[in-house]
Amino acid sequence: MNSRPLDRLRLKPVLLACAACLSTGFMVSPLLGANTAAADSDGGGGGSSSATAGEMPAAPSTVPLEIWKGNARVRKVLQPTTDFSQAEPFEVMQGGAGTQTTNTDRNAYSQETSTLSFEHLQTFKLGNALFNKMWVASPSSTQASDGLGPFYNARSCQSCHIKDGRGQLPVAGEKTASLLIQLKNELDGHWGPDPVYGGQFHASAVPGVPAEGQVRITTEPLTRQFSDGTRHDLQKPIYTLVDHAYGDLHPNTILSPRMATAMPGLGMLEAIAAEDILAYADPEDADGDGISGRPNWQVLDDGQRVLGRFAHKAAMSTVREQNVHAMFSDMGLSSSGDSMSNPQGDCMPTQKVCESLAHGEQERLGKGEAPDDVVDLITFYTHNLAVPARRDVDDPEVLKGKSLFYDSGCQGCHVPKHVTSRDATQEEMQFQLIWPYTDLLLHDMGEDLADNASEAEASGREWRTAPLWGIGLAQTVNPNTSFLHDGRAKTLLDAVLWHGGEAQASLDNVLEMSQDERSALVRFLESL
């Protein structure tokens, strides 16, 4: 049984086809199959195109030649706009055909991809239940829910990703939950965990076990000044670990704070072809634009080296990999993979208390405290949280802000548009025009944002370009959230003003803006 018309699923890529029509002058009948609308190079999809009277000349291509090579229609759709007098076709549907258009309140991030079949919707709801489940320590009468810890930051996925959105900084006296402190140490020329406390510092532990300690956050001021004389104060966080329960950290260990990220659109980001992401890489800045994005790579348990695209430094290759690493590091839950199989989680050999504790792995349920069936359901849920539709796309101030965003060079890293692969694993994610505003690459963001610690192939000054879709609703979903990798930016303008490194030229352009222009830029970001 399927509660949605089959034609809707079969014709969902017509969104892209229509965008191609409007951008190039092609007329494509919706009766054509899903794969014929923009399928072939220069007329391969049927018909031909010609310039019409008064048509604007085509802007020079800024889409790398390798992206949808030979498919002129798709490449035309992906060209950055030069017309800021009106919204682009289907710009409001920033998550593709599966964009959710029903909620702009606190539940805006918690809706399913709208094109899911009835069967997939059932799977989504089961995953949602597990994403919200509170895990408990072993042994427990709830045998499918035990295995927490011994050390942990949160008891559920939802506790970090509040309402499926971003985390929040702790207030005075609170334990850190959705702000994580990763521990990085370069021993013998290789980056790894702290030899005493492991890869992450945990402010909570199961009953009878002392937590590793607590996190204290203080700030020091930093000021940016606009060309009109306006001063804007920022607060740079300083992190200190206190109440160490297991001795001192290694003196060379570096603290790398990480705020839990928003969940919508992850499946669509995974559906972008790897070669499309790599095509935007320019590690030697061959084009001389000052932007030299480069990829990060994850080495899987089997030795395979796979393109990274998730987490703050793009160290995780898939939504599933991100999930199992988070469950292991944040909650102490083991899974079936060799590197995540220790049922004592992030315990180190020096933490002897872990050796005598019960674990939650049960042979009848499968390998790991979070067996594959559990991980698969959570992954399906996190893969299919829909991006909310944009608001006010035709508002004059929003359009002005969009123009300023482009003129300032922000789109050089925050690439507006992608078309997902026809070979994406899940049908609902295939061949979709999406607007995530990211290249998923690493960029040097300057000394002010540096954590000075390497992760996989990312340096201490590099961070992944954060997707911007949905960001305008972040503080509606969680009024206590903030922005950037560690939540230091209280507002979207704060986040812009922290940019440096490869984004220094863009920052300089923003500092030249008038008050009205700054307001328009923020209005544009709030519309995403």
Image (spheres, rainbow, N blue to C red):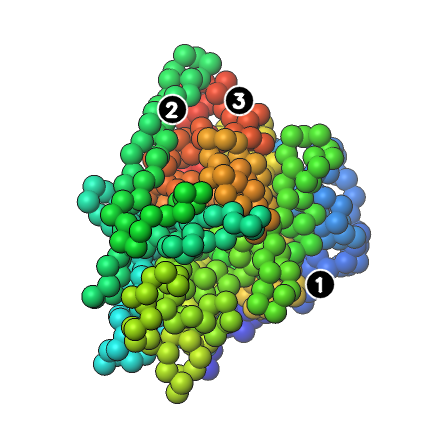
Within 10 angstroms of label 1, few (less than 14), some, or many (20 or more) residues?
Answer: some
Left or right: 383 in relation to 76: left
Q: What is the CA distance from the residue labelled 3 to the residue labelled 1?
A: 45 Å
Q: Nearer the viewer, residue 503 or 139?
A: 139
Q: Earlier in the sequence, mark 3 or mark 1?
A: 1
Q: Is residue 92 visible?
A: no
Quarter occupied by residue 9: bottom right
Which residue appears at 31% of the width and 51% of the height?
247
Q: Mark 3 highlights which residue?
A: 508
Amino acid type at image mark 1: Thr
Q: What is the CA distance from the residue labelled 2 to the residue labelled 1?
A: 54 Å
Q: Position of residue 400 (x, y in %)?
A: 50, 28
Q: Secondary structure at mark 2?
A: strand
Which residue appears at 39% of the width and 87% of the height?
364
Q: Earlier in the sequence, mark 3 or mark 2?
A: 2
Q: Mark 1 highlights which residue?
A: 36
Q: Secondary structure at mark 3?
A: helix
Amino acid type at image mark 3: Asp
Q: Secondary structure at mark 1?
A: loop
Where is 501 relative to 191, above or below? above
Outermost bottom residue: 364
Q: Position of residue 337 (x, y in %)?
A: 50, 71
Amino acid type at image mark 2: Leu
